[in-house]
Amino acid sequence: MKYQCFIFDLDGTLVNSIWALTKSVNDTMKAFGIAPIDTEQCKRFVGEGYKKLVERALIHGGDKTLSHYEEALIRYQQVFKDCCLYRVKPYGGIPELLAHLKERGIRLAVLSNKPHPRALDNVNAIFGEGFFDLVNGQREEIPRKPDPAGALLTARALGVKPESCLYIGDSPTDIKTGRAAGMDTAAVLWGFRSQQELRACAPTYVAARPMELLSLVGE
């Protein structure tokens, strides 16, 4: 079997969480009198953790010097805790893909730049507690992607060599993460970034639909 473990990004890969992310940003910006963003802008701002998301939203709204940055980070975490599941749904075909992978004995993991408690909230609410073998969100002790530390930690924890893992995500950050960890990568086209942007990163594979990933398991 070519891959023993599939490591998935969360937002834009397993679940469509753009409404929750956009609402959290806008509720935060509103507290400082800063203009809201729309979902398309949010798609461009996400992928490198909530601190970068807040920073980009502030600058977009006119706070070029980030005078509200520290306060906004605190506010965002409070808001996001309450609405991180707002309109969040798995992408069509994802539950079926995961079920087939489990049947084949593939280890399943999540590695996200979403704060760890909120990553757990999303995964447990959408897929059920204990469905994935391991879930890692952003924590202080794990450098955020594209640093490969989280991917390598995941592989070690599951007893799988990096070259036996496939890293799946919807952003250049994900492709860089997998490559830096010595893993093959799959870019998915149903998420937050464009096909052109993803292909430019030269992932090992490109998938237009979730079930296409099943063919990559090998024998």
Image (spheres, helix red, strand yellow):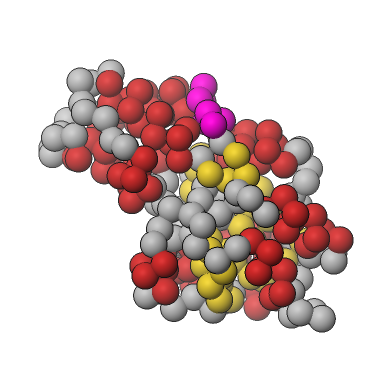
The span shown in magenta is 81-87
Vertical placement of residue 75 versus 66, above or below: above
Image location of residue 123, percent across then percent down: 66, 41
Total label count?
A: 0
Residue 52 visible, this angle: no
- Residue drawn at point x = 17 percent, y = 30 percent: 67
Residue 138: x and y in percent read 51, 45
The quadrant of the picture occupied by the C terminus is bottom right
Locate residue 185, reporting x and y percent: 56, 72
Image check: 26 left or right of 149? Answer: left
114 and 147: which one is in front?
114
Q: Quick check: 107 above or below 79?
A: below
Query: Measuring 20% from the left and 26% from the top, which residue is drawn there?
Result: 34
Which quarter of the rendered picture does the N terminus lie within? Answer: bottom right
Q: What residue lies at 48% left-to-right and 54% top-to-bottom?
A: 191
Q: Is residue 43 above or below residue 167?
A: above
Q: Is residue 152 left or right of residue 26?
A: right
